Image (cartoon, grey):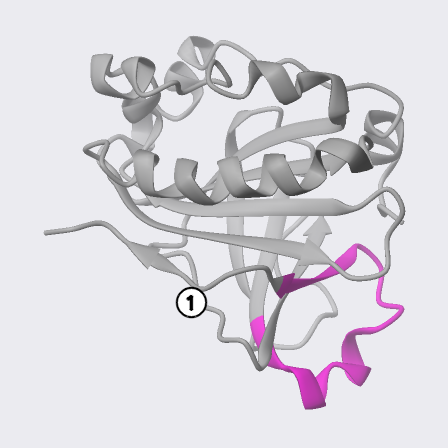
Amino acid sequence: MWHNLTAIQLHNQALEPRDVTEDRVIASEEAGLIMIYMVEHTFCLPELEAQWNAWYFDNLKVLLGVPGFHSAQRFRISDTTPPRYMAMYTIDGPDVFESKIYIEAGGNGANSARFRPGYQVWVRNLFADIEVAPDVASDQCLVTADASSAHGDLPATMQWGRAVGFHKTTPYRGFSVVGTDALAQWHGLPGVTIYEPHRGRFIAAT
């Protein structure tokens, strides 16, 4: 389950992405800094899931052709019904979402309109203070923790991002890459979600 009231409420409705313009003001001090962009979905139409996953795989590579996108990787939470997915990107900051190239590439959900009926949850968050989205191998998981402040009582290996744009469903999110044989310490901790890599990490061409 999701571990804060806002996220639980989000399960009951698919959210339209907000206009990022107002977040540019909030994030103005971070202009030019590398950020992590995360997109979370709960997909409730099993008859379209395989087609949607195939589209998403190609769309990661499309977005990496947009200046300002540096890495992309997709994840899934195991044993959830309906299935929950997350895509994580390293980007140059909120300005990339207003670029002509991003919009023409189908950014802000334009290219996925045909799959929108399957989005029980569609949440976008932008996090500062972490320079590169972690690379998660097939024998590892990405552990995230949502919290009202950074650090807290969680293991020191966690790096913390501060929400600066889009839905901002949590003030802070911690990130840690953990081997699949070392997940026991994370189960049951408040705010923690464990993601398995759905595919490998892609890097933008240089």
Task: Give yes or no for residue 104 being in the magenta stretch.
Answer: no
Q: Quadrant of residue 103?
A: top left
Q: Is residue 190 left or right of residue 133?
A: right
Q: Is residue 87 left or right of residue 99?
A: right
Residue farthest toward the bottom in the current orientation of the protein: 181
Tell me where residue 40 appears, x and y as whole percent: 64, 38
- The boundaries of the magenta stretch are 177-196
Tell me where residue 27 appears, x and y as whole percent: 39, 26
Amino acid under disc 1: Asp
Nearer to me, 79 or 71: 79
Q: Is residue 196 left or right of residue 79?
A: left
| Residue under numbered circle 1 | 135
Residue drawn at (40%, 54%) of the image = 130
Tell me where residue 110 appears, x and y as whole percent: 47, 13
Residue drawn at (41%, 36%) of the image = 59
Q: Quadrant of residue 13?
A: top right
Vertical comparison of 103 with 52: above or below: above
Nearer to me, 148 or 158: 158
Tell me where residue 118 appears, x and y as whole percent: 75, 25
Q: Quadrant of residue 138?
A: bottom right
Q: Kindly tell me whether residue 122 is visible in this rendering.
A: yes
Task: Give yes or no for residue 179 being in the magenta stretch.
Answer: yes
